[in-house]
Image (tube, rainbow, N blue to C red):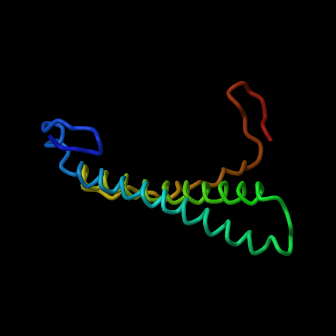
Amino acid sequence: MVNIGLTRVDDAVAARHPGLQSYAACQSGAFMKGTGTFVLGAGCLFAIQSILQKKLPYPLQWNLLVSIVGSSVGSYAVTRWETQKCADLWILMETGKVPDRSPPQVSEPEVSKGHEKTKYGDVMD
């Protein structure tokens, strides 16, 4: 049996997905980076605001709120970015192809060329 965190995965499933262990390790790393970003971000934002508080005095509760909200946003962004890389790695290991993350091409709408008749006999401009 293969262990993924606290969950055990059956050997048959692990045999069908040889990259499962690598994917689990990548996801674990992504979550740890997100957690580290939250802790370091909250500490840095709190320290910066403590320095700025001498010029702009405001209550400590706002200092904490801004630090926590700001670091939460940063942590979410880092975790999402790293998780996307893990998903791309999983797709690469399963299919052998790199997923295409480029935005779809938007075609230009056709410009009407004069008057056209509809199937009802009406003229369109």
Residue 78 is left or right of residue 117, and the answer is: left
Task: Find residue 53 and report its image quarter.
Answer: bottom right
Residue 24, compared with residue 42, is above or below; it is above
Residue 81 is left or right of residue 59, and the answer is: left
Which residue is pictured at 59% across the width and 65% down the height? 41
Which residue is pictured at 80% across the width and 41% down the height? 125
Front residue (pair 7, 85): 7
Front residue (pair 125, 65): 65
> Residue 91: percent from the left, percent from the top?
31, 51
> Residue 58: percent from the left, percent from the top?
84, 62
Residue 103, compared with residue 20, is above or below; it is below
Residue 39, compared with residue 21, is above or below; it is below
> Residue 96: percent from the left, percent from the top?
24, 55
Residue 69 is left or right of residue 31, and the answer is: right
> Residue 111: percent from the left, percent from the top?
71, 51
Front residue (pair 120, 43): 43
Which residue is pictured at 76% across the width and 47% down the height? 114
Quadrant into which the N terminus falls: top left
Residue 26 is left or right of residue 17, and the answer is: right
Which residue is pictured at 37% across the width and 58% down the height? 29
For this orientation, the residue located farthest to the top is 120
Front residue (pair 73, 97): 73
Task: Find residue 82 and report its image quarter.
Answer: bottom left
